[in-house]
Image (cartoon, coloured by chain):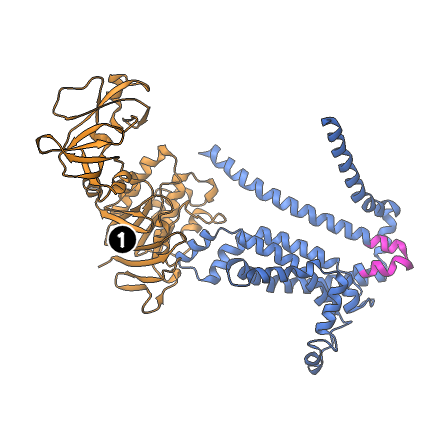
């Protein structure tokens, strides 16, 4: 079984990194705010950081074991590491970069469609090209594990989508245990089979992107996954529903059960907007002024004082939405998820 | 008020430039170029040139060979007392050269710290060419260390990490990544150290003496000829100015070439794609 297993305890400056994970032939993304210890996980797996306790095993091969005093050097582990900003050797050309650790470059350069750049220096490449060179270099020694540190962060927004799709295909094709670190939940959801949310060195939740969106373990995970998280006090409502009085005075109803302090979790794409409160099955209608409109591809993110809604750009056009105008945000009680808040 | 201040700056700059350049210019203005070349052909000059070249070459080679790996270790590794080590290395920089000469005597002289051991081996260092080499290496190595440590520290540690994850042993990381990337800084440090070594005077005079054909280097010859034959002293001085100027121009040119080659390669791809 080609898989990567680790159970680490690594003291960092502000907290201890403590997590255990088992990565099969799949891509697992670690997401979290910056400074949550994501990169340190990759460094510990690669042997560039030395945990105080724990173990790292790859396909039955022990790379690190604090009890047996095993700590293989980075050059003795078989990892392909794609560094943040790529860390290409500036004095070597693309081909020399890729073959630095041995192996042949031509097949990989062809697969990543950069064979025409074989003799170019890294300074002459675009961000997307550099990323592909970094991938080719990481894969040239046929590593047993692929580690990717913020592979999308150095790219400008309009190449991001295409590069993400290419990376997705490559990761599926490789069938390697891959550990990817990103601060962007969308990147994680698009690239990974499973996503782990890391906060202050601890894993809050691990699951498929759908599981994280559908049943986030806590308000932080929900917010990180892109949900609106609104705090309030829950009590029994009409018809067996729960009603939640939000901090700004609005009252919403939910099919979830909760009492006392609770967080409303509501995804922007579950919110619809209208000029006047529609007469439909949705029980929640909140009126507010549009703060800002931001178009993301064919979608429009509409920010109201208390929540963000995401509707199609076409609907925003049809409703002629402008900042400063009053709209009604509607969502069903079944879409208003409640989580205990502390 | 603003105009007065601007005038003040201009005057200060003019005085500084005149003060620094006038004596240098005077060397060339005092003696016609033909006489300078004649003076360089004299025995005393030629002997001193040979002694200087030989001792500097040996001392400099030793400093590069031993100093480069040592600088790499000091730049890469954090250990207790590292700050103290770095400060101690720079101590010879602030010592008066005469004190450096006395210190070398105290260490390697007949009655010095290692005098007994050296005597047993039948080795005598003071007032030999070996003493010149030691004196030159002693005063020039801190210059090389300073520049070389800074050059290695400037190499992005992520590149070193990347090389290691690609299976490179520490020796290969040094040879294929650190050394080529620090080459510019190492070259500059080496040039500066070499210039300092060639100009070494005080420590050599005390520890090695000033014996023509044996220990009399060019700076010592300048001093010796100062009273005997001022023109020869001037000619050697002119030689130093020219070598020094060439060294500086080379360093500046190197920096400029590096910059422009990066610029050119970027420009070339953006037009071809």
Asked if B174 appears above or below B2 in the picture, the reply is: below
Furthest-bottom residue in this view:
B120
Nearer to us in this view, A49 or A2: A49
Asked if A202 appears above or below A293 in the picture, the reply is: below
SS state under label 1: loop
Chain A visual colour: orange
Asked if B132 appears above or below A97 in the picture, the reply is: below
Nearer to us in this view, B251 or A257: A257
| Mark count | 1
Is residue A186 among the parts visible in the rendering? Answer: yes
Name the spot of residue B174 as percent of width and height, x first.
50, 59
* Residue drawn at x 67%, y 54% as measured from the top left: B192
* Residue drawn at x 37%, y 63% as measured from the top left: A76
Q: Which residues are magenta?
A: B220-236
Which image quarter holds the C terminus of chain B? top left
SS majority, magenta: helix
Q: Which residue is mark 1?
A: A177
Which image quarter holds the N terminus of chain B? top right
Chain B visual colour: blue
Is residue A107 among the parts visible in the rendering? Answer: no
* Residue drawn at x 34%, y 57% as measured from the top left: A45
Furthest-right residue in this view:
B228
């Amino acid at each position: 079984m080609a898989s990567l297993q680790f159970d680490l305890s690594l003291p960092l400056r502000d907290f201890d990194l403590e997590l255990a994970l088992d990565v099969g032939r799949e891509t697992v993304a670690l997401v979290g705010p910056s400074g949550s210890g994501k990169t340190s996980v990759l460094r510990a797996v690669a042997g560039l950081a030395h945990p105080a306790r724990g173990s790292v095993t790859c396909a039955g091969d022990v790379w690190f074991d604090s009890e047996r005093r095993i700590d293989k050097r980075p050059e003795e582990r078989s990892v392909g590491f794609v560094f943040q900003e790529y860390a290409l050797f500036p004095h070597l050309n693309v081909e020399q970069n890729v073959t630095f650790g041995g192996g042949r470059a031509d097949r990989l350069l062809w697969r990543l469609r950069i064979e025409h750049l074989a003799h170019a220096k890294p300074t002459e490449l675009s961000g997307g090209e550099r990323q592909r060179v970094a991938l080719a270099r990481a894969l040239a020694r046929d590593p047993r594990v692929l580690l990717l540190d913020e592979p999308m962060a150095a790219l400008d927004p309009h190449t991001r989508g295409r590069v993400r799709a290419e990376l997705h295909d490559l990761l599926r094709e490789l069938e390697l245990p891959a550990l990817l670190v990103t601060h962007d939940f969308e990147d994680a959801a698009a690239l990974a089979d499973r996503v782990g949310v890391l906060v202050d060195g601890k894993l809050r939740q691990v699951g498929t992107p759908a599981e994280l969106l559908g049943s986030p373990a806590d308000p932080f995970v929900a917010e990180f996954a892109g949900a609106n998280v609104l705090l309030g006090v829950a009590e029994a409502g009409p018809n067996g529903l729960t009603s939640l009085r939000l901090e700004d005075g609005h009252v919403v109803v939910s099919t979830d059960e909760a009492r006392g302090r609770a967080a409303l979790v509501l995804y922007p794409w579950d919110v619809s907007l209208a000029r006047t409160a529609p007469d439909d099955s949705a029980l929640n209608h909140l009126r507010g002024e549009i703060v800002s409109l931001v178009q993301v591809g064919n979608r429009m993110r509409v920010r109201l004082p208390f929540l963000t809604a995401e509707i199609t750009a076409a609907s925003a056009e049809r409703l002629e939405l402008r900042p400063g105008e009053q709209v009604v945000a509607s969502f069903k009680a079944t879409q208003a998820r409640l989580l205990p808040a502390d | 008020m603003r105009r007065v201040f601007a005038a003040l700056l201009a005057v200060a700059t003019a005085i500084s430039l005149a003060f620094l350049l006038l004596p240098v210019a005077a060397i060339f203005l005092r003696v016609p170029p033909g006489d300078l070349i004649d003076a360089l052909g004299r025995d005393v000059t030629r002997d001193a040139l040979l002694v200087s070249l030989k001792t500097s070459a040996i001392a400099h080679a030793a400093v590069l060979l031993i100093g480069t790996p040592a600088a790499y270790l000091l730049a890469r590794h954090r250990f207790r007392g590292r700050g103290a080590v770095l400060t101690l290395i720079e101590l010879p920089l602030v010592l008066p050269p005469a004190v450096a000469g006395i210190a070398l005597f105290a260490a390697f002289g007949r009655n010095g710290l290692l005098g007994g051991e050296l005597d047993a081996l039948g080795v005598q260092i003071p007032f030999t060419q070996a003493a010149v080499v030691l004196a030159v290496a002693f005063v020039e190595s801190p210059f090389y260390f300073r520049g070389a440590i800074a050059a290695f520290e400037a190499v992005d540690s992520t590149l070193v990490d990347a090389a290691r994850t690609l299976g490179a042993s520490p020796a290969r990381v040094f040879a294929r990544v650190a050394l080529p990337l620090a080459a510019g800084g190492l070259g500059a440090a080496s040039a500066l150290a070499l210039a300092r070594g060639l100009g070494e005077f005080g420590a050599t005079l005390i520890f090695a003496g000033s014996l023509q054909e044996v220990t009399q280097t060019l700076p010592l010859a300048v001093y010796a000829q100062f009273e005997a034959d001022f023109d020869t002293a001037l000619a050697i001085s002119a030689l130093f100015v020219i070598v020094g100027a060439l060294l500086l121009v080379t360093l500046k040119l190197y920096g400029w070439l590096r910059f422009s080659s990066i610029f050119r390669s970027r420009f070339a791809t953006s037009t071809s794609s």
